[in-house]
Image: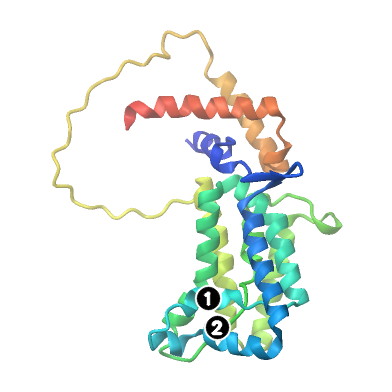
Amino acid sequence: MLTQYAIMMFAPSEDQQPLAYFRGYPLYATHVVMIFFAATMLICTVIGNEALIAVEGALGFSSELVYHGQVWRIFTYGLINPPTLGFAFSMVVLVWFGRDVEQFLGRRIFLTFYGVLYLLIPLTFTALGFWRKFALAGQPGTFGIFIAFATLYPGALLFFRIQAMWWAIGGVVIGTLISFYNRDFIGLIAFLLPVAFAHFFVRYEQGRLTLPQIPMPSLRRKPKLRVLPNPNLDSDEDPDEPMAEVDALLDKIAKSGLASLTEQERKRLEKAREDLMKRESPRR
């Protein structure tokens, strides 16, 4: 079952293809998000610091003002991005690792994932706002994107030939220690929530995590079961042989990423995906 789900997820569908090409370079939704935030940085640079303070007062997140009806601040806080090295590094992380995450999840699920990452902290601060006032401004850190990448490809070699898994663990440990040193326990929550969400979201999309199901009584009458003939029983083809080939392709993707597949291997994976969808269709 896990192998079948992996076929559906890894097969290069329409949703996993680039939005467009610019001079032969593929452009994904990740690049569009980065360009959008880069544009906000340019606008903040042009209007200057004094005007930016006024803009922050109108668009920045404030739990107190949200309780007074200014709900838009939950969505607009990320538009305030003065030029900083931290912002530039965040954009590099978004493009570098976000593209691989998007290729795995598909465009629609990736945008949903990033949207939840964007709203997670202001919604959490809004929920805790009855206890203490919170303020927030600036594009959220993209560490959650890197955590998603490290969850997908823990063995990928990055800087200094250190695996992505160890970079992720080191980043989480350092961020936690900084929060403890500053006695900033609310900041610790804001740091760990996106990390946990990114990790478990990817695990769920991989099929390695299932959500608990609450049994609900059904008022509908259960349909009678009927036996369907299996068209594969009379076939001489060994079902284990093509599945072994697909397993090898999935292992290659897990080690080197989706981009490592050749055109012929992509077609083989896509054919396995189509065959699986045909077998599943009578059950729906």
* 160 lies above or below 182: above
Which quadrant would residue 166 be assigned to in this image? bottom right
Instruction: Tell whether label 2 touches label 1 (CB within 8 Å).
Output: yes
User: Mark 1 = which residue?
Assistant: 76
Q: Nearer the viewer, residue 102 or 275?
A: 102
Q: Residue at x 61, y 72 (%)?
A: 140
Which quadrant would residue 11 be assigned to in this image? top right
Mark found first going from the N terminus, 1 or 2? 2
10 Å crowding of disc 2: few (<14), some (14-19), many (20+): many
Q: Secondary structure at mark 1?
A: helix
* 281 lies above or below 213: above
Whole-percent x and y of residue 161?
A: 84, 54
Residue type for callout 1: Thr
Mark seen at residue 60: 2
Residue type for callout 2: Gly
Q: Is residue 145 left or right of residue 126?
A: right
Q: Secondary structure at mark 2?
A: loop
10 Å crowding of disc 1: few (<14), some (14-19), many (20+): some
Q: Residue at x 59, y 89 (%)?
A: 54
Q: Is residue 82 in view from this perspective? A: no
Mark seen at residue 255: none
Q: Is residue 43 left or right of residue 272?
A: right
Whole-percent x and y of residue 280?
A: 39, 29
* 162 lies above or below 20: below
Q: CA distance from mark 1 to mark 2?
A: 7 Å
